[in-house]
Amino acid sequence: MFQWVTEMNVIGLHSQFLSGIDYLKIDGKVIAVSVVASGRYSNNVNYSDVLVYSGQGENPALKRKQQLEDQKLERGNLALKNSMEEKTPVRVVRMSGRRISNKVYFYDGLYLVDRYWQERGKFGKLVFMFWLKRIEGQPKCTFWEKCEI
């Protein structure tokens, strides 16, 4: 469990401070290594062994922009697509709590990107959605079920 994203950065669990998708370039191809489901995007959906994760880009809750654009298949979105094609596992970190005083990040395990699609988001623009499925055989993490998510 972690209280700050910086702690995850220090141990190498997730090296991005602001982005929810962390990725590396391997043999010229970007591959996702971790995602943080922090609730910053309104369409993150949580199930016990599945995470439906909204793509990177164009979140008006995070930045003031006059003209929003559709998300593009680049950076973290491209990395998640490539991870699906390469079948590389992605570390998932979830956040519980909504207030600074009670938020906790916790490592939930390794997931595989099963599929992705585009849909109209809350503000009318196209958003990439990624279906991540927890790899079987890992110890169950029930911590998040007891928290305010």
Image (spheres, grey):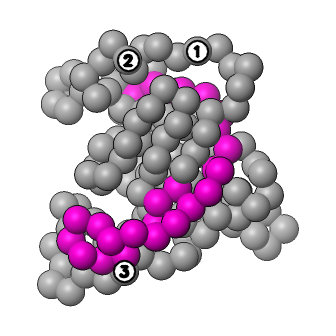
Packing grade of label 2 (10 A; few <14, some 14-19, many >=20) is few
The x, y position of residue 25, in whole percent, is 72, 64
Magenta range: 105-130
> Given the image, on which type of amino acid does mark 3 rest?
Asp
The x, y position of residue 86, in whole percent, is 80, 58
**Labels 3 and 2 touching (C-beta < 8 A):** no
The x, y position of residue 48, in whole percent, is 48, 26
Q: Is residue 104 magenta?
A: no
Q: Find the residue positioned furthest to the bottom.
A: 67
Disc 3 target residue:
70
Does the rendering let one see residue 144? yes
Does the rendering let one see residue 15? no
The numbered disc on residue 145 is: 2
Q: Residue at x 20, y 32 (%)?
A: 98
Q: Is residue 117 magenta?
A: yes
Disc 1 target residue:
140
Packing grade of label 3 (10 A; few <14, some 14-19, many >=20) is some
Q: Residue at x 58, y 15 (%)?
A: 140
N-term mark: 2 or 1: 1
